[in-house]
Amino acid sequence: MGKILVIAEHRNGKLSEGTLELCKVAKEIASATGNTPAAAVFAKDDSIAKELAQYIPEVLSAVDAKFEYYTADAYSQAIRAVVEGNDVKGVVIAHSYDGVDFAGKTAMAIGAGIVSGVNKFEAKDGKVIFTRNIFNGKLQEQRSAKTDKFVVTVEKGAWDKEPSGSAGAVNSVAVSVGEVRTKVKEVIETTKGAVDISQAKVIIAGGRGTKDADKYKATVIALAQKLNGEYGASRAVVDAGWTDHARQIGQSGKTVSPDLYIGVGISGAIQHVAGMKSAKCIVAVNKDPEAPIFNIATYGIVGDLFEVVPAMLEELNK
Ligand SMILES: Cc1cc2nc3c(=O)[nH]c(=O)nc-3n(C[C@H](O)[C@H](O)[C@H](O)COP(=O)(O)OP(=O)(O)OC[C@H]3O[C@@H](n4cnc5c(N)ncnc54)[C@H](O)[C@@H]3O)c2cc1C
């Protein structure tokens, strides 16, 4: 019986919420494949490992000053040492900026196949087959690693969080970290002081249809300011860096229920709708009459947002 090993994410001494989702994934894969779930924590002390033991039966804790800040070099070396010292069958990593950064390096280091950005799995004939979205969620594909071990990165929000209640063991592991070629000089929080859009009464949300950061600002943000509301975004917009994650609405973002939600250039993917379907009045602006957002809209405007939004602003200015 081997281990399905979660790699915990933490920052500023705080365990990430996503790691609790990974605990659930590891538990499910372990139970479907006859393995055991475990997690590895690389940190400057063992306080996070102790916290994580409430969610998973075994935590392997490696303590080193080099783990104070995340670096791909330190993490991939540490994971390699843990995998070599334990019978690890699968490594479960968050599909986050950090996770994607070290997952490939880790797969190389331990000689495992990697599947990235998964949102489902099934176990068949001893193999774990993962499902992931491709072409912006329009299609799904199934993949499995050809190697005995696998590394997988898991989409945020695809699984629920594992509830606390486990009284897991914390086992120290000795890891000697060699050269780390990245030095973290400062951590700058981009979302510091960000608003909590989940409390807003009026939300204008923009999607990929707004084309770029400047046009998103000229349409979505301008309309939000005019209506004294907040602006929000689909994940496509957040991933493109046009606004920050605190404004993402949906399964892996915020759940909102404003009196008025106006979706501009948003298709209405199921993961987005999960976060806004309880809005009292939903207005959708989309040039595609078949866009799924129209299925839940109170009012639908089929048209080019670059004509519709300026017309709305002009009326409001009057
Ligand atoms: C596990 C998981 C979690 C996810 N979590 C979230 C989440 O929390 N939130 C989220 O939003 N997504 C989430 N997604 C992604 C989701 O599946 C979609 O990919 C995403 O919502 C698409 O964003 P979009 O509607 O902006 O882009 P698209 O789907 O590309 O839609 C753009 C829309 O703009 C319209 N358009 C283009 N040009 C114009 C124009 N000039 N005028 C008017 N309309 C125009 C198009 O017709 C199209 O309908 C998640 C996916 C997964 C797998």
Image (tube, rainbow, N blue to C red):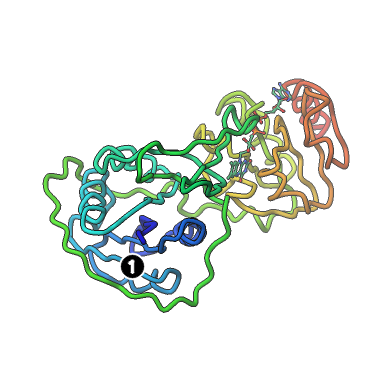
Quarter holding ligand 1: top right
Q: Report the quarter where the N terminus lies.
A: bottom left
Q: Local crowd at mark 1 within 10 Å, few (<14), some, or many (≥20)?
A: many
Q: Is residue 91 left or right of residue 177?
A: right
Asked whether 185 or 160 is in front, the reply is: 160
Q: Callout 1: helix, strand or loop? A: strand
Relative image position of residue 98 (x, y in whole percent): 36, 45
**Foreground residue among 277 and 179:** 179
Residue 304: image location, x then y, percent: 76, 21
Residue 196, image x and y in percent? Answer: 60, 56
Q: Which residue is mark 1?
A: 59
With respect to residue 73, does 38 lie above or below? below
Query: Which residue of the protein is positioned furthest toward the right in this rendering?
Result: 299
Q: Residue at x 63, y 50 (%)?
A: 251
Count of numbered circles in the view: 1
Quadrant hosting residue 72: top left
Is residue 205 positioned above or below 259 on the image?
above
Q: Is residue 160 left or right of residue 29?
A: right
Query: With respect to residue 235, does 93 lie above or below?
Result: below
- Across and down, in percent, residue 22 comes to 47, 56
Name which residue lies at 38% across and 72% down.
53
Question: Residue at 45% across / 53% down in the picture?
Answer: 192
Q: Residue furthest front?
A: 125
- Choose between 172 and 9: the one closer to the eye: 172
Q: Is residue 114 left or right of residue 32?
A: left
